[in-house]
Image: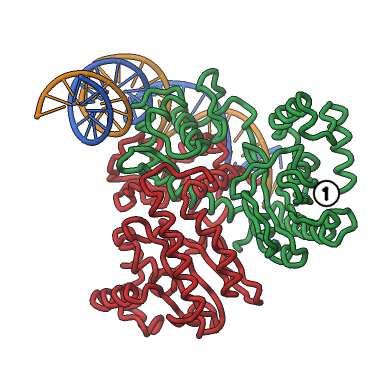
Chain colours: A red, B green, C blue, D orange
Amino acid sequence: MQDIQTSSNPSLADSSAPTERISSGGLQSLDLALGVLAKLARGAGPMSLKDIAHACDMPPSKVHRYLASFLAAGLVSQAGRSGKYDLGLNALQLGLAAMARHDFIAAATDRMPDLRDSTGMTVLLSVWGNDGSTVIRWERAASPMVTSMGLGTVLPLLTSATGRAFFAYAPQAPLKPTLAVEAARLCAAPELAPEIDPSPEGLVDLHKSLRAAGFASVSGRFIPGLVAAAAPVLDWQGEALAVITLIGTDEADIEANAKPVKELRATCAEISADFSVTVGSSPSQR
Amino acid sequence: MQDIQTSSNPSLADSSAPTERISSGGLQSLDLALGVLAKLARGAGPMSLKDIAHACDMPPSKVHRYLASFLAAGLVSQAGRSGKYDLGLNALQLGLAAMARHDFIAAATDRMPDLRDSTGMTVLLSVWGNDGSTVIRWERAASPMVTSMGLGTVLPLLTSATGRAFFAYAPQAPLKPTLAVEAARLCAAPELAPEIDPSPEGLVDLHKSLRAAGFASVSGRFIPGLVAAAAPVLDWQGEALAVITLIGTDEADIEANAKPVKELRATCAEISADFSVTVGSSPSQR
DNA sequence: TTGATGATTTCATATTGTGCAACAAGTTTT
DNA sequence: AAAACTTGTTGCACAATATGAAATCATCAA
């Protein structure tokens, strides 16, 4: 997948001010408009025209015209009384269509219920998005366990099992911004994760040890008593397309030789193998 | 949500030729570009520049510029060797963000595992999209049951339980195109669904009986031996925002007074009640 | 009733989008 | 190996739209 997010182009995630813009090779007004959509998507909820315009540093009349086109396309909706704008159901449709296009998601989704049943643990599927490690699907275990994790949840890179799996196996370039931010924070406040050496040397060591283990695990990170183990789904180049994570309560379950970890890694290996076979050919319709 | 899909505007679903266009009030080039994205989203898989241009009835150079902007925004990706274009991961992100914005989806998603556990049946959540009744989430029951249903699956309006629930409770205007097509097909081949009278009078009767029942059911529709019951999640105006469907194998489970149907309707009533309370106010972050 | 605020539209002007042709890159045919 | 073909990409002259300030419209509060 061609990725120019690292440039100053207005990717859907990057809503920096529209100055010193590198040409996308496309249309300038389309680039600006998609930046508006990105800003709306990044927002916490419905936004007024005025707020969107302010956030995008554009005159309201300009933003209004962009939103009118997005409204017509169904990517955006507008609340009748308040006039506020939000994402529309066609944005959801687009997301579903995109999800359907990535075979590894279907392959992983198919196997997650069995993994949950055989391990008795909650299973997450995450991809690396613009904001970082993003949960796109989960299968909740039957055991009574409270979690506020929802679709779209972004997990930290260095302090979550999921993030660490990406750190170990994902292409490094897209990780750099997030890595820099998190490493700086851990340098400033080492008590947040005393087991991590956020220095460049320490991160190299962490990378090596994660690779050697073939999976990542953390204990008591988000909610005391919860443990997590994560393994990558690799593409034909050995890079992480996605990460599957098991969440449970028994620390013994995330030991390297524990049954759940073995099944997790086997499942990821199966998916990785399936996907490698199809690389280069048109994905079959599922 | 403002919905002008029925006009000739290039909604994300409608990729009709760009002639006799009603102004969206936005930008013409943005409208055209979003039409290209819609065409790509509707496609079965990766498409070449030439094919997209032909499908959109545009010169390749024009389409190429639009795609360049979408590439920069991450909504589209391009395969290195074949040069084919497909939906990118940021389209998926956008969909997840949209999903997070609709509280009824979160409310339904929260309750689906419990409904699956208490009924022992597979649970689907569907919204009405441009192509029709679209599955956006499901919780598969533990019983060994094969289904090819995936995210994005579109169910028929008149011959599926889910579709019938939408038919009974959704605003009628968006249903009309699909209804017309299906009614015509059933008129031409009544053996497809002998229990349905597709005449206008018959459809009025069907509507009334579904409303009276408060839920829809079908038996042996897609896979012989499978039964389904569906009920709507209503908004404050009593219109269907979504439909929840139970799928199982025991015909007794979809009788009006069966426990699963009662729990299905109770769950939908709970969600409908929750959502009604929040109508008009800004949705709280979940 | 008046004033304030935000959304939407008008209009003169600035700026970009367009389509054909040329070019680049890769594949197929001879 | 060379020529021909196909597809993707870019240059450029011209056509057409996008733009932003201001005006207008709609709603709400005092």
Tell me where residue A237 appears, x and y as whole percent: 31, 57
* Residue B280 appears anywhere in the view: yes
Q: Residue at x 81, y 47 (%)?
A: B217
Tell me where residue A54 appears, x and y as whole percent: 46, 48
Q: Quadrant of residue B30?
A: top left
Tell me where residue B2 appears, x and y as whole percent: 64, 38
Q: Residue at x 26, y 74 (%)?
A: A204
Left or right: B281 as drawn, with respect to A59? right
The residue indicated by pointer 1 is: B215
Q: Nearer the viewer, residue B64 or B159?
A: B159
* Residue A40 appears anywhere in the view: no
Q: Nearer the viewer, residue A98 or B228?
A: B228
SS for callout 1: loop
Left or right: B110 as drawn, with respect to A181? right
Residue A46 vertical position relative to residue A204 in the rendered view, above or below: above
Left or right: A142 as drawn, with respect to A109? right
Q: Amino acid at mark 1?
A: Phe
Chain letter of disc 1 in the image: B
Tell me where residue A119 appears, x and y as whole percent: 56, 74
Residue A244 vertical position relative to residue A19 in the rendered view, above or below: below
